[in-house]
Image (cartoon, helix red, strand yellow):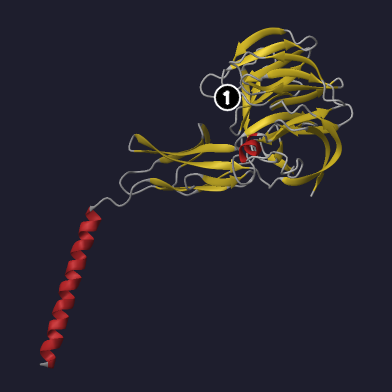
Amino acid sequence: MLFGLKTKQISTFILFGITLAFLGSCKDDAPKTYRSLISPMMGLNVASGNDFEVKALFGKEGKVDSVIYLMDSTKVTAKTDTMAIKMKTAGLKLGNHLITARIYGDGKSEDLTSNVNILAAQAPVEYSYKIIKTLPHDTSSYVEGLEYHDGFFYESAGDYGHSSLRKVEPATGKVVLKADLDQQYFGEGMTVVGDKIIQLTYREKTGFVYDKKTFKKLSEFTYNEGTQEGWGLNFDGEKILKTDGSNTIFFLDKNTYKTIGEIDVFDNKGAIQQLNELEYIDGKIYANVYTTNHILIINPETGAVEGKINLSGLLADDYFKTDDARANNVLNGIAYDKASKRLFVTGKKWPHIFEIKISKQ
């Protein structure tokens, strides 16, 4: 009885082994693996300046003679083996980049792709503020653009039926010169370029050129093929900077107003959307982030956010009485007096323009 039981167990074990061997041989006859990029993972965030690994799973179905690795459409390196490589990010534009491993073998090629997001290398420096002076401001102005030139504020007010271009006396808030826009236009960002003022509209894809001295409209131009909107505008002395509510700052030719370049804005965590009003100050771009109390300090070469000014509490929380008014009448307006190095900020329909001084927290 005991001997018979042992014999049955041995027979069962032998049968199990034969079954495994059969299944194993079937598996050997099946395709081994699919080719893919196993790193970087799709959408990997990489801090600017850091390297990242590119590693392909080559499979066993086809011969690999060589591999070319590309960043976007630019060749990075070529290999005759299947070892992983390191890609560098130093000097790359911030934002999304396509990674390709182009595999050659048996007279054919196959592309494996992934992508990475290059982010700012460091977290932005945090700034607080001190109010230096409080100036009066016309509360009918839904501020879209603000600049300081020759002792006056130049201001673009928005909203359909209430849009205008204004020249304002700082000490009194008095509007000394004004040009109203037709009701079909929603006025947006503006900037002074020499003896002219350039003003955008929101969704009408129309820009206006005025004589700075008289506010006489000299010409109109169209811009932004596609779906881009007109938001902020500023002149850095060489080119015009423009926003459309995304995380992109566009560069426009100062004479033709055509796009000649752009940067995408990222901090160390990701893209910063809703960039709005702009000012170019001491080699940096200052930008309002719409619906927030933050102004960003941006590197104009890379798009990296180097600083963030928290202006919470600048206007009393209970000044606007309804949720709708608080949601719409937000911080928006940056002006800089280059001669005296004074920084001014305000918001939509705010009762004041504030001269502030910022400092690191």
Residue beneath the point at 84% across and 22% down: 169
Location of residue 6 with respect to 169 vertically, above or below: below
Say few, some or many: other residues with alpha carbon within 10 Å of mark 1 (under 14 / 14 to 19 / 20 or more).
many
Q: Amino acid at mark 1?
A: Glu
Return the x and y of residue 201 as percentages of the image width and height: 62, 19
- Residue, x 79% and y 33% (percent of image)? 352
Is residue 239 something one can see in this rendering?
no
Q: Is residue 71 above or below residue 252?
A: below
Q: With 297 as the anchor, is 339 left or right in this view? A: right
Q: How many marks?
A: 1
Residue 143, visible in the rendered structure: yes
Which residue appears farthest toward the front when viewing the image?
Answer: 321
Relative to 64, is 170 on the left or the right? right
Q: Is residue 46 above or below residue 207?
A: below
Q: Looking at the image, is 104 positioned above or below residue 230? A: below
Q: Secondary structure at mark 1?
A: loop
Of residue 84 and residue 170, the one placed in the foreground of this image is 170
The image quadrant that residue 330 belongs to is top right
Q: Residue furthest right?
A: 340
Please state, as top left, top right, bottom left or bottom right, where the N terminus lies in the image: bottom left
In the foreground, 157 or 282: 157
- Which residue is located at x 81 percent, y 29 percent? 336
Q: Which residue is mark 1?
A: 229
Q: Position of residue 108 (x, y in %)?
A: 34, 35
Q: Position of residue 339 (x, y in %)?
A: 88, 26
